[in-house]
Image (spheres, coloured by chain):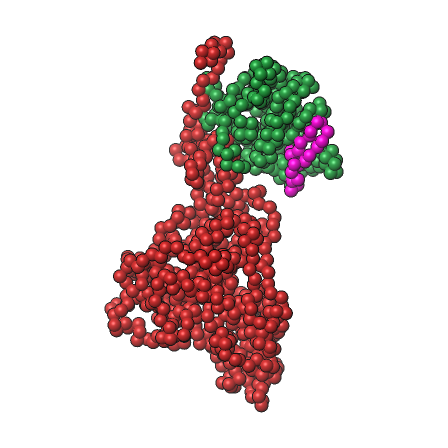
Chain colours: A green, B red
Amino acid sequence: MDAELMQREFMYPGHVACPGCGAAIAMRFLLKALGEKTVMIIPACCWSIIAGPYPQSALKTPIIHCAFETAASTASGVRAALDMLGDTETTVVAWAGDGGTFDIGFQALSGAVERNDNFLYVCYDNEAYMNTGIQRSSSTPYGAWTMTTPGRDWKKMRKKNIVEILAAHRIPYVATASIAYPDDFIRKAKKAKEIKGSRFLHVYTTCPTGWRIPSEISIKIARMAVQTNIFPLYEVEDGTRYTINYRPREYLVREYFRMQGRFRHLTDKDLDQIQKMVDEDWQRLLSKAGQG
Amino acid sequence: MTAEIKNRFLIPLSWITTEGNKTGSWRFLRPRFENKTAPCSAGCPAGEDIPLIEMLIAQGEFKEAWETILTENPFPAVCGRVCFHPCEGFCNRGSYDEPIAIHTMERFLADTASRYDFRASATDTPSHKERIAIAGGGPSGLSAAWFLSRLGYQCDVYEASPEVGGVLRWGIPAYRLPKDAFLQDLRHLEEKGVGIVTNKRIDEDFLKDKDDAYSAFIVACGHGKGQKMGIPGEDNPLVIEGLDFLKNIREEKSVGCEGTTAVIGGGNTAIDVARSVIRLGGKAVIYYRRRRGDMPAFDEEIRMALEEGVEIFELLSPAEIRRDNNQLLLSLQKMVVSGEESGRARVVPDGKKQETVRVDRVIRAIGAKPQEAWMNPPDNGADVQRLSHSCLVYKKGQKPVVYAGDLTNETKSVTHAIASGKQAAIALDVLFREGFAAVPKKLDLCRIGNGQAHSIEIYTGGRRKERSSHIVEFSEVNTDYFTFTPRIRPPLLLVEERRRSFNEITLKISAGIAIEEAGRCFNCGLCNGCDNCRLFCPDLAVIKNGEIRTINYDYCKGCGICVVECPRNAMSLEEEENT
């Protein structure tokens, strides 16, 4: 990363994210890429807390806190207002967690991107409703423990593939990014900034608290998610053109699962099953990218 | 401003930052920057700062890298060629793919120094009144002179031969160590103002110092006298001493090598002799009493000797030599392995089984000893300190004497000789400043990690002193930041060319290749400014000021990401006190 990008920060310390929070790192990277001419729309999510209690703010850019289900529609409105003011320079960003994207904010998101409204929607995905106390969402992966999928009732449904859903809307740009790959992340955020229309970034953000992992391996876990093909790094342009950005070393998924408390109950048989699912998804992605 | 205030009534608008929250109070683990010790540098007898050298090469700072070698070792051109590089055996990268080619990097820096005519910077002027005499101008004596002059002493080196260098000048053949390479290193010693007196053989009386010219002596005369086999017929003029044979070649005297030459021994001298015989057009056969795997010669040397056509017969010990016209009949006793001793086979005669070979001469290379008995260090006593690489003697009413080099070293290599010279210099400095009793403790303080090597930089309080003595293990390196890359192999002369001449075998490498190879280095325990700590900190608590990085403990929550994401273990995480 070049020195100028390393140097510029649009976040303040003293925010109240948990130690090792991936979402805090993701916000730092995103703003490094986008710069100060950015408006953040934040629905109910961890970041509503992280940004600080009133009257504090953890960001040097404006934030609009909005209702849980309204990130995309608020972004549409802010964009329209800026356009009326003749401000085409400012980037409007909806910054929502997986709950506000996959579940509660889903219809607003689908509606806004169907209209191809001109904003960047970033979902920072920590795979459950974390700030309310770790409840499962439709982003929670198969096999995970949460407060609402406890004990033997661990989640038996697969994680919703949000990237495919967004790609199916044929919007100009959908991509995945990870906090463990800052250069790739920042390149995608910059690319997204320059594109007109609806853009969607799906960002993998570790949650040490909710995943029952030590905070210091936050980045390592994120890297392993990519290297096991659980969270591949790729882009979809216009809903059709797939590019895989990183060919991983293909570690076994069990190495990733064994490091996390939320998967501790899984047996070897379960892990074999998960490995099959991951392999299958990866093959499907490869064939979409014309590499299958 | 008015608009802002108005808005505050319409919707709540933040007007202060989160900086007031000192989230550092949450912390129960405390990260900190802590450079540590790399295993290679602890494994280098001369204690070179290898991770720093590789880092500087990777950054293209060749002069700084070369001077970093010079800090701990005055012989980069020599060691870049003849050192048996134990460092590479300790290299953590060896547990990942292949060790860094540290040896080749040292050679590269020496070549670069010669090409761009690097000079060792700022010579420090002698600041101490003590003057020291050094007997022997081999690698240990010259090293002692180098380190003593760096510590501010005047010294004179006395050498019996017409030129200094010892084994470097007269022993090792030119295809391994060309004369120019040695002279290149000798130059900075000369520029240091070390007095060199050649053609002056030292005797026992010299230590008595009748003129009172010196404050201390270093005896570093080496092992210059070949050992005898102790068998009948050994005194025949066709039985030649290996060291003399090599010396004659280096003095460009003609040595006959026609026909078959039997070489007795399994060390580097034996291999050097055999390979020289091949180059002079003769046939060389090595007879060794143990097995080939037990030979003390370096594996690489043995391998190349075989390539060049040297034959090696094992488990044969010379028993008798008889003259037969202009040839010799060499009887060899067959040996069998009866067990193991210190990692090598113990062998005993296999009954009376003997074989006899007809050869044109026998060259003996079974080890060497001091030329005269007084060169050996005295037996133990209250006034004798046996150190790891030298022996310090300070008898009442006499001047202190340090015995160094082959005279005291268990492993007789050039690098160990350099280590010995360094230890002798430090020992004398401590003795002059703080007295005889303080020597062991002071030496211990400038050890690198838990190894045998000492660092002059640590001794003189340089930046290396700040590093922790913890030796970085492979498991502590974050290999996610490295990719498998094969190590470089320096180009070599073709075997056909090697057989014909004494030209140097190992050729030069380009700067581009060197930079790439040095970039493979993990730089174990040494911050190279990669900035991962700063990049990944969720709390913006790693601050960079110039090239200095610090942690802002007002905000650091102690998550530990910086420590784990440091690729080279240059950070540590400790439990916070008062929690």
Q: Horizontally, is A95 left or right of B526 in the view?
A: right
- Indicate yes or no whether the magenta region holds residue B478: no
**Main secondary structure along the magenta-highlighted residues:** loop
Q: Horizontally, is A238 left or right of A54 in the view?
A: right
Q: Residue at x 48, y 50 (%)?
A: B61
Q: Residue at x 54, y 37 (%)?
A: A1
Q: How many marks?
A: 0
Q: Residue at x 55, y 60 (%)?
A: B508
Residue A223: image location, x then y, percent: 59, 37
Residue A50 visible at all: no
Look at the image and give the residue range highlighted in magenta.
A228-250
Q: Where B346 sits versus A108, above or below? A: below
Residue A171 visible at all: yes
Residue B274: image location, x then y, percent: 56, 74
Considering depth in this image, is B531 or B417 the residue closer to the camera? B531
Considering depth in this image, is B442 or B214 the residue closer to the camera? B214
Considering depth in this image, is A261 or A105 the residue closer to the camera? A105
Question: Residue B275's image quarter?
Answer: bottom right
Q: Where A118 sits versus B267, above or below? A: above
- Indicate yes or no whether the magenta region holds residue A232: yes
Residue A206: image location, x then y, percent: 57, 31
Q: Residue at x 36, y 50 (%)?
A: B461
Residue A222: image location, x then y, percent: 59, 34
